[in-house]
Image (cartoon, helix red, strand yellow):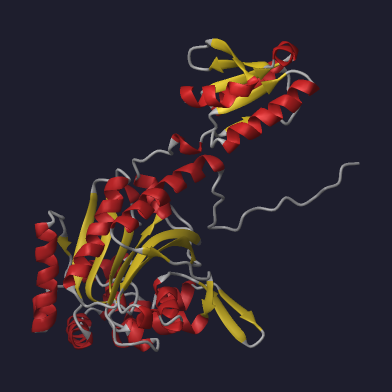
Amino acid sequence: MAENFKKFKIPSGMKDILPADAYLWQEIEDKARAAFNLYGYKPLRTPLLEEEGLFNRSLGNETEIVKKQMFVIRHGEDTYALRPEATAGVVRAYIENNLDKTDSFVKLYYFGPMFRAERPQKGRLRQFHHIGAEALGSNSPYLDSEIISLIKHILDALGISGYELKLNSLGCPEDKQKLSRILQDRLKDETEKLCPDCNERLNRNVFRVLDCKNENCKQVVSRLSLAPENYLCPECSEHFSAVKKNLDKLNINYTLSPHLVRGLDYYNRTIFEISHKDLGAQDALGAGGRYDNLIFELGGPKSGAVGFALGIERLLLVAGCRPAAAGQTKVFVVTLGEEAKKEGFQVLDKLREADIASDMDYENKSLKGQMRKANDLKVKFTILIGDEELKKQSLLLKDMASGAQEEISLDRSVEEIKKRL
């Protein structure tokens, strides 16, 4: 009687990245890595798990992420959280490892999974992946512009077009307080139209009203007349003007979006979002901005910083790139009989030592089955070894596109195959 074993399923909101898709992921990561190298950014890897307090402090207790979306793990007296975003962890690593003391200005990039307990939908998973960069140690508006230029370089490399860059400035802490008072004043007569959460946000953190996804709240926000010149101090206004002028000189198109605030409390001055119409309601490909106070607030020096993150799953939905042939098997070894398999296994090893992607049958398939496997792998050549070839110390090399076959001696096989690839 067959045993009835339970079949386990992947948790809701998470996804297996199967080999056919993984090649495309590698292509995206490789092109992003090339762009980071071009712009002078260095790789950094931080843990998936951080102290919960790191995110409470950096993201803000009133943000949706902290209040509703973090995966929290309690172990004894310690409380951790799976990272919902990477910037806080990067800043923690920057401070803890004294990177500011070894180099006053650093440019870092990362790839990796993030976690948020959201309702799964198109382009929004509970485990999702980011490509991101953080530049720490400068207040220069040129750095804001470089970060946006870097994003454009990555999107261009991936063949992505039709996106929109939305741009705004929140100014310094004093400017943000002024904007907060403006918002509270303009929304005080709209309380009946706002959702219960936004009525609470009016006094706790009014910026979250601008980020609310409730349709009634979005309509109220859309009618607000906001303009950075009404709250930016002269210094922040000059900074924002410089960013815009730099983007104009680089021919980077943008749309001024005065309602854009981003969903995290640490942002100040320049903020931006990249959206794409093909993504539907969840249309953000990525976003970022300045966070000039976060390093100091987490115990480090007073240093300016700016960064961004792009969602890999969302890039995949609109990307024009295709997986490179670089990872594809080029040669398949077909053998007839045990002695031929022994010889074929040695040939296979020599091919791999020569950096030729190769494979062979491990299922004892028939000649027809082995050739079918070679066809499925879309190899350029098959090597056929049987009794006749063993006697002659040779092999048959078959061009899978033309069907042409030629006999090659075993001792020159690798050299001859390299010539034909």
Q: Identify the residue shown where x is 44% and y is 58%.
A: 124
Res 55 visible: yes
Query: Where is residue 164 shown, x and y percent of the image?
Result: 22, 54
Left or right: 180 with respect to 333? Answer: left
Q: Is residue 386 left or right of residue 310?
A: right
Residue found 44% across the figure and 67% down from its top:
44
Q: Vertical placement of 307 versus 35: above or below?
A: below
- In the image, what residue occupies the spot 28% across and 59% down? 39
Q: Residue 4 or 162: which is nearer the viewer?
A: 162
Q: Is residue 411 left or right of residue 71?
A: right
In this view, 302 is above or below 330:
below
Q: Nearer the viewer, residue 406 or 310?
A: 406
Percent across and percent down for residue 383 are 62, 20
Q: Determine if residue 284 is in view.
A: no
Residue visible at 21% across and 80% down in the picture: 187
Give above or below for 38 relative to 328.
Answer: below
Q: Quadrant of residue 130?
A: bottom left
- Residue 151: give x, y in percent of width and height: 28, 57
Which residue is the extreme one toward the front? 411
